[in-house]
Image: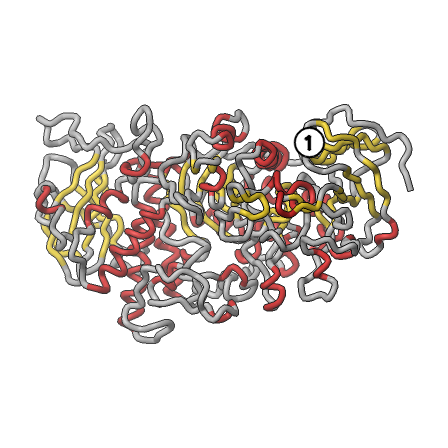
């Protein structure tokens, strides 16, 4: 069957399928192809005989294109690309493979499981079998722009508190959300879910990947699935499985509309939406694996290959393939995707998975890589929240502190040193080298990592995303309950997942009814949360940590779409108390600007002759005397005081007192002529509710319990 009236696209540079008067313009990049067909289908993916092929014009600068009359919203389609089969040169063309549109805004249908006897035809080979019955289809959608009305909340970085969550896992067991909405975009936008988030006090929701994704072959064979979604099948389409049945029944447009509606309702509640995006690799995995889209269109163009060996991938992601960000077309695809989700869908920012890969040139990572320059300077994308996971698995892959402003970065030094100070160092009774200076640097905003700019210090402490837990690794509860990982459910004999947990089970592995063990575990959780929320920088909490959610020791639950990963909302009293503590800490951070500085501390006293004026930051020993080099270099130093001030009328000062020893410590509040102090939080408290406010004067002495943080604020 042919379609009359097909002509070259009047916009051959425009990629994807876009509805225009009378039909659609179509464009797809396939630089080394000799022919590309657009393939049109009915709504039934099991009916390949209904396929209509349209030969595209090209290539124009590597793009194949056409104006196709009669195309409309809801049309199912794909591509077939012909060209050389020269694996040693990186070319793997086979027109029998039906390919998804890399720019497709919707995806419908299922990818056949690799346990299916037909699945071998999907592999990168010369098999002549048509793969159309085995793969999903791209679907034409209407542009969603204009369907969301609420302005972006645009929370300033210094006021931001990030809450990392999984769309499904957050509400799957939330009883106040109607059952048919649980685990969906609509469920996340339900009043009960929104009320929970706003009452907790977080400002910004960071969603684990919501781009359309597929499970890896080995998970198919194990009867598991890629729950986290770090296996992208389409960078423009929302993952349909997270939509309600009602939305899925309406097709790709219904899924997109539900997602856009979720964003709008979260905006109405004042919450930002940040997407965790995976532009570093795709679901096509290693060179001989499945052909779904990019590999069939231009394998050598889209994927990074080893120097002087284009037939072999240069894998810097640990997934089998790496998208080649030295290719301008790959940069363009990622940029176009970011603009789409920002301008058309309305999200507020992005967290870039394995972001070091996105800055790799042929000579390694570059802060001035065109992609990094592009996203930070783009008038649309550059105004969103941009967060880098600043590493990958390749050589020179740890790049913390090297991303350009205004990007922020996950700070693994903060994570590791905070865990070490409160957990592993405490378990061992200390270290032979000083640990207090490292903790102090993290509390003060990690200037050593993020201050080396031109001009100096321009990024500020907000560039550091401070966290002790994220989706990858132990939960907060499990950090305090397990010395080792317990990933048996993943089917890899507990070999997967990191062994560098820096955790401490406090004497008992796993669940226990021992009262004293549970008491100190809970204090450790409060210490870790307090360090995150009271440090200079941008705090991030893993969803569920505020209630002590457990994964029963699994530190790599990427394939556990079940109760292991879903948040359990049936709370014991101690869990409700922990949530109240987190609410209290976030409220203190919001109420006292001194706790959320936008600029790095300079450490000097603006009025040295006036003892009523306090320096913007100062460190003191347990006896209240100022810091000294000898004190910092003493490996036994684990009691310290951190004073912060804005020196502005009407603004409180703050004093953070830390006892990292296994015994109570006597401390003397630094004696100066400043205002008295109120003790507003003590990690020894099970709950801050009902605790009488105590007031202390400079120079007062008191006893602080073992392994404890205290926060004092001055009375203004």
Residue 403 horizontal side relative to residue 51, left or right: left
The outermost residue toward the bottom is 513
Above or below, 287 against 465 in this view is: below
Residue 234 horizontal side relative to residue 267, left or right: right
Q: Residue 139 at what x, y percent from top left?
A: 75, 44
Q: Residue 317 at what x, y percent from top left?
A: 49, 49
Residue 700 horizontal side relative to residue 81, left or right: left
Q: Quadrant of residue 122?
A: bottom right
Above or below, 340 against 516 in this view is: above
Above or below, 440 against 704 in this view is: above
Q: Residue at x 55, y 65 (%)?
A: 562
Q: Residue at x 41, y 42 (%)?
A: 390
Quarter of the figure that contains the C terminus: top left
Residue at the disc numbered 1: 62
Quarter of the figure that contains the N terminus: top right
Residue 665 horizontal side relative to residue 411, left or right: left
Figure label count: 1
Residue 68 seen from this side:
yes
């Amino acid at each position: 069957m042919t379609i009359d009236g097909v002509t070259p696209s009047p916009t051959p540079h425009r990629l994807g399928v876009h509805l225009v008067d009378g039909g659609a313009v179509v464009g797809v990049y396939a630089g080394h192809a000799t022919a590309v067909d657009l393939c049109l289908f009915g709504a039934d993916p099991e009916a390949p005989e209904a396929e209509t092929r349209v030969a595209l014009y090209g290539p124009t600068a590597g793009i194949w294109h056409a104006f196709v009359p009669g195309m409309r919203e809801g049309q199912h389609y794909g591509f077939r690309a012909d060209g050389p089969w020269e694996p040693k040169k990186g070319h793997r063309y086979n027109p029998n493979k039906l390919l998804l549109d890399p720019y497709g805004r919707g995806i419908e249908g299922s990818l056949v499981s690799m346990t299916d006897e037909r699945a071998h035809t999907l592999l990168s080979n010369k098999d002549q079998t048509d793969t159309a019955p085995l793969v999903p289809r791209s679907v034409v959608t209407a542009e969603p722009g204009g369907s969301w009305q609420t302005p972006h909340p645009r929370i300033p970085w210094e006021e931001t508190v990030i809450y990392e969550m999984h769309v499904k896992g957050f509400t799957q067991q939330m009883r106040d959300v109607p059952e048919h909405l649980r685990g969906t975009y609509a469920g996340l936008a339900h009043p009960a879910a929104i009320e929970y988030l706003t009452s907790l006090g977080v400002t910004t929701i960071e969603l684990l990947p919501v781009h359309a994704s597929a499970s890896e072959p080995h998970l198919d064979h194990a009867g598991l699935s890629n729950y986290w979604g770090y296996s992208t099948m389409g960078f423009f389409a929302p993952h349909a499985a997270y939509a309600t049945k009602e939305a899925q029944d309406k097709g790709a447009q219904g899924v997109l509309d539900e997602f856009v509606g979720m964003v709008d309702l979260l905006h109405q509640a004042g919450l930002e939406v940040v997407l965790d995006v995976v532009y570093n690799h795709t679901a096509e995995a290693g060179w001989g694996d499945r052909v779904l889209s990019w590999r069939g269109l231009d394998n050598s163009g889209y994927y990074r290959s080893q120097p002087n060996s284009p037939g072999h991938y240069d894998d810097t992601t640990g997934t089998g393939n790496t998208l080649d960000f030295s290719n301008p077309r790959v940069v363009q695809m990622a940029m176009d995707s970011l603009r789409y989700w920002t301008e058309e869908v309305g999200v507020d920012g992005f967290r870039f998975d394995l972001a070091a890969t996105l800055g790799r040139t042929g000579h390694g990572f570059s802060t001035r890589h065109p992609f990094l320059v592009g996203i930070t300077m783009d008038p649309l994308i550059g105004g969103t929240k941009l967060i880098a996971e600043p590493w990958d698995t390749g050589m020179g892959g740890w790049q913390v502190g090297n991303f350009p402003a205004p990007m922020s970065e996950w700070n693994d030094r903060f994570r590791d040193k905070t865990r070490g100070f409160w957990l592993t160092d405490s378990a061992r009774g200390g270290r032979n080298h000083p640990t207090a200076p490292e903790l102090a640097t993290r509390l003060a905003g990690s200037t050593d990592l993020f201050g080396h700019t031109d001009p100096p210090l321009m990024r500020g402490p907000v560039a550091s995303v401070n966290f002790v837990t994220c989706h990858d690794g132990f939960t907060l509860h499990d950090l305090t309950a397990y010395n080792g990982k317990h990933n048996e459910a993943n089917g890899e004999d507990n070999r997967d997942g990191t062994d560098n947990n820096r955790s401490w089970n406090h004497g008992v592995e796993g669940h226990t009814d021992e009262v004293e063990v549970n008491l100190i575990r809970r204090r450790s959780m409060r210490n870790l949360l307090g360090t995150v929320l009271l440090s200079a920088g941008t705090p991030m909490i893993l969803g569920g940590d505020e209630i002590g959610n457990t994964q029963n020791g699994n530190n790599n639950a990427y394939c556990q779409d079940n109760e292991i990963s879903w948040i359990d909302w049936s709370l014991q009293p101690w869990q409700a108390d922990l949530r109240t503590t987190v609410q209290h800490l976030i409220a203190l951070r919001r109420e006292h600007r001194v706790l959320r500085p936008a600029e790095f501390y300079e450490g000097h006293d603006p009025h040295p002759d006036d003892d009523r004026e306090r320096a913007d930051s100062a460190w003191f020993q347990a006896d209240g005397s100022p810091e000294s080099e000898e004190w910092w270099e003493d490996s036994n130093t684990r009691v310290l005081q951190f004073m912060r001030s804005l020196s502005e009328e009407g603004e409180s000062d703050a004093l953070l007192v830390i006892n990292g020893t296994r015994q109570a410590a006597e401390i003397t509040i630094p004696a100066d002529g400043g205002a008295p102090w109120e003790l507003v939080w003590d990690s020894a408290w099970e709950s801050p509710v009902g605790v009488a406010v105590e007031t202390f004067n400079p120079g007062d002495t008191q006893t602080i319990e073992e392994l404890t943080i205290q926060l004092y604020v001055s009375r203004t």
